[in-house]
Structures are given as structure tokens and as C-alpha cells.
Image: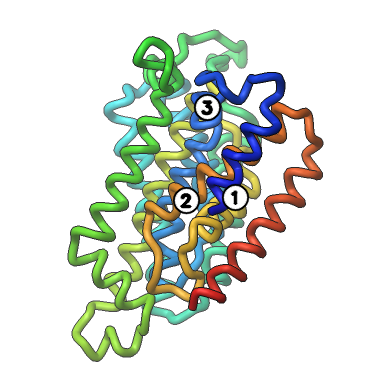
Amino acid sequence: MALVLMIVIGCIFSADGAFYRWSVHRDMLRQVSVFGILACGMTVVIISAGIDLSVSSLLALAAVTFAWLTMPQGWSALAAVPVVLAVGAVLGSISGVLVAQMRIQPFIVTLAMMVFGRGLAKVISGGRKITNYVPDADGVSQVVDLPEIFGIIDSRVLGGNLSIVTIIFAACVLITWIVLSRSRLGRHIYAVGGNLEAARLSGVPVRLTLISAYALSGVFAAVAGICQAAQETHGDPETGIAYELDAIAMVVIGGTSLAGGKGSVILTLIGVLTIGYLQKILSLNAAPEATRLMLTGAIIICAVLFQRGRE
């Protein structure tokens, strides 16, 4: 209903017909794709009755690591991408171990990981953006070519009508759907989120399930970081601040229950599109950022109240 409402509002406040042009929708999809990738991982964690506040910092860490490997270090994309994904998986797994094994609240664990990840990104980058201006042994900056993968990720296909990053987002949605709907891990995630003790008594490997959920969220954060670095053409340790709030909002607006055990990535996709259209409509009509933030907050409250009413 929220998505339909956004489209109706867009048709009414079309900014002299701009809303009816495909380029507007194409750009909207490109702008929300990185948030949507984060929201895929967030969906898995929230269904398991957890939360992951660290995704924005892991995104920044991935962006910095990817830029550092491909520019100053001169690694190929084929070598750099697996390393960056592994970093995301490892840090996500650490959060999962602390939640599942040490029984620390997910909010506290991922808050600590958010701070740690941001600090590690600053250590790797020296507190500066990593660009294609690479200093040599004498401290003189030399310009190196941007990695080819940056141009590929930030390019368009189908006659310029679809961005590659949007295709990556769609692939992440598909992978998440397969994991949640067509795999044993997905069934275990729903079971743990619905009732952890009942799942344990039923033979579900609760600890491994939770670790896998947070590891998957870390991998998606790394994918988002790679896309962010490609779009910005550098690795910035300050990038992605507060992105976790947008990701949570997209999941909640879609209808996935914060209590766990209910929801799907298809609902998250609806939430991503709802937020994306809201931001694009406000942008087309030159609305201030304060208005966007207030409306987003109001929509989140309405979504939660709607969920409560259905339950």
C-alpha cells in the first residue's frame, strides 16, 4: 500500500511530467541499490530476531579495502573482490559468534562492531580517502588509471536504460530469496527467529544459524562497499554513515517483523522501492532534506502500526 501510495503521489506531483520519464526511475533504482544490498543482509538478520548496526561501517571498510587493493597495491579485481568479501564474512561471523556463543545482545554486539569497523577503515586508509593519486617512495603523488572494474560497476546496459549496480542489487535479492525460501538455512533462520528455544529443542543448530545470518549480512555489506567505491571512484573511511538506519527502515516498511520469524526479501524490495520513490519525488519537487527525514520517520511508524494491527 505504501509503494502504491508513493507512485500515486509521484503521478500527481510529477514535476511537469518528469516522473513519467524512464530516466527518473532508472536513476532512482541506481540511487537506492547500495541501500537495497545492505537491506538484503539486514532482512536475514531481522528475520532471525536480531539487528545489525555494523553494516554501514563494514561498507566503509570494504570500500576502503577494495580501493586500497586495486589502486595503491595494483591488485586485479578478480583477486581483490574475494578478499573484500572474505573480510565482510569474517567480521560478520565474529558478530554472530558473540551473539550466538557469548549470548550478548545483538544491539550491543553490532554497535561495537560498527565502531570497530569504522576505526579499522581509518587505520587502513590513514584517515584519508584512497584515490588514484598514489604517492611514490619520495612522497610525490602519481596518477594511476582507475581500475576497470570501477567503470564496469558504474556503467549502464540495455542502451543506457539500466545501471549495472541495479543488476547487482537484483542478484542480491535473488540470492537472499533462494537462501530464505529454498534452503535449509533459510528454514532454520525462520525457526530461530520465531522461537529460539523451540528451534533448539527441535534440533535446529541455533548457533551455526545465527553465525551464518550475520556472516551473510557482512558479505552483503562488502558487496555494497565495492559498489560504493566504484560509484565514488575512491575509498572513503567516512562513507556510508547512518546507512544502517536506511536499511532497517526499508526492511520495516516492507513489512518484515522486528520480532523475528516473519518476513521476506520480496517485502524488503517493496520497502526499498517505497523509500526510493519517496526520495525521488521529494527531490523532483525540490523539497528540503528535513522534509524527507520527517516523512521517512512517519512512514516507519505507520508501517509498524500496520504490522501490529495485522498481528
- Give the alpha-carbon distance from disc 1 to disc 2, as whole Å: 8 Å
- Disc 2 marks which amino acid? Ala
Counting from the top left corner in percent of width and height, residue 120 is at 55, 47
The one of 226 and 173 positioned closer to us in this rendering: 173
Tell which tag, 3 or 1, sits nearer the viewer: 3
- Give the alpha-carbon distance from disc 3 to disc 1, as whole Å: 19 Å
Counting from the top left corner in percent of width and height, residue 311 is at 49, 78
From the viewer's perspective, is residue 240 above or below residue 157? Answer: below
The one of 233 and 279 positioned closer to us in this rendering: 279
155 to the left or right of 76: right
Q: Residue at x 43, y 23 (%)?
A: 163
Counting from the top left corner in percent of width and height, residue 169 is at 39, 37
Disc 1 on helix, strand or loop?
helix
Which circle marks residue 304 in the picture? none
- Disc 1 marks which amino acid? Asp
- Give the alpha-carbon distance from disc 2 to disc 3, as whole Å: 19 Å
Q: Which residue is mark 2?
A: 39
Which circle marks residue 25 in the picture? 3
Q: Residue at x 37, y 48 (%)?
A: 219
Please tell me how crowded label 1 is: few (under 14), some (14-19), or many (20+) other residues with Cα within 10 Å.
some
Disc 1 or 2, which lies upstream in sequence? 2
Which quadrant of the figure has residue 278? top right
Q: Which residue is mark 1?
A: 246
Disc 3 on helix, strand or loop?
helix
Disc 2 or 3, which lies upstream in sequence? 3
264 to the left or right of 107: left
Q: Residue at x 30, y 38 (%)?
A: 82
- Disc 3 marks which amino acid? His
Residues at badges 1 and 2 in contact (C-beta under 8 Å)?
Answer: yes
Disc 3 or 1, which lies upstream in sequence? 3
